[in-house]
Image (cartoon, rainbow, N blue to C red):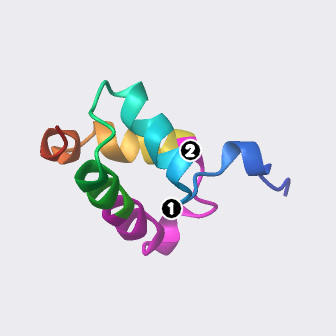
Amino acid sequence: MAFASDREQVSQQPHELKHVLRKYNKRQTQMNQDKLSQMLRDFKSDPSNKPYLRKEFYAYLENSSRLEKLQ
């Protein structure tokens, strides 16, 4: 089994959160970063999402109403 590179994984780092917000044309406010950070914690709390890849996190956001919670 090949391991995912750091580049493929999603993190809680502020620059990563801002990148995701920009990707979805959302404001990069602290409130949005906090909400997105919580969404990421929820995503990572589910072991079935391992190894927590960026593309799976994007699908997690896109296949729900989560993006609507961000401005």
Cβ–Cβ below 8 Å for labels 2 and 1?
Answer: no
Give the dominant element type of the magenta stretch: helix, strand or loop.
helix
Question: Does residue 49 appear to the left or right of 7 in the view shown?
Answer: left
**Which residue was labeled with disc 1?**
49
Say the numbered circle drawn on residue 25: none
Q: Give the camera-side residue of 28 and 66.
A: 28
User: Could you say where residue 12 lies in the image, as x and y percent from the top left?
Assistant: 52, 61
**Which residue was labeled with disc 2?**
54
Q: Give the camera-side residue of 35 and 55.
A: 35
Q: Quadrant of the C terminus?
A: top left
Element class at badge 2: helix
User: Could you say where residue 58 lies in the image, as x and y percent from the top left?
Assistant: 43, 39
User: Could you say where residue 26 lies in the image, as x and y percent from the top left?
Assistant: 27, 31
Question: Does residue 59 appear to the left or right of 10 in the view shown?
Answer: left
Q: Amino acid at mark 1?
A: Asn
Q: Which residues are magenta?
A: 38-54
Mark 2 closeness class: few <14, some 14–19, many ≥20 residues within 10 Å: some
Give the residue drawn at x 49%, y 36%: 19
Q: Amino acid at mark 2?
A: Arg
Vertical order, 3 against 8 (above or below): below
Mark positioned earlier in the residue sequence (2 or 1): 1
Give the residue drawn at x 40%, y 39%: 59
- Between the C-alphas of marks 2 and 1, the distance is 11 Å
Q: Give the camera-side residue of 17 and 10.
A: 17
Is residue 39 found inside the magenta-colored segment of the image?
yes
Question: Does residue 31 appear to the left or right of 6 in the view shown?
Answer: left
Is residue 57 found inside the magenta-colored segment of the image?
no
Q: Quadrant of the N terminus?
A: bottom right
Mark 1 closeness class: few <14, some 14–19, many ≥20 residues within 10 Å: few
Element class at badge 1: helix
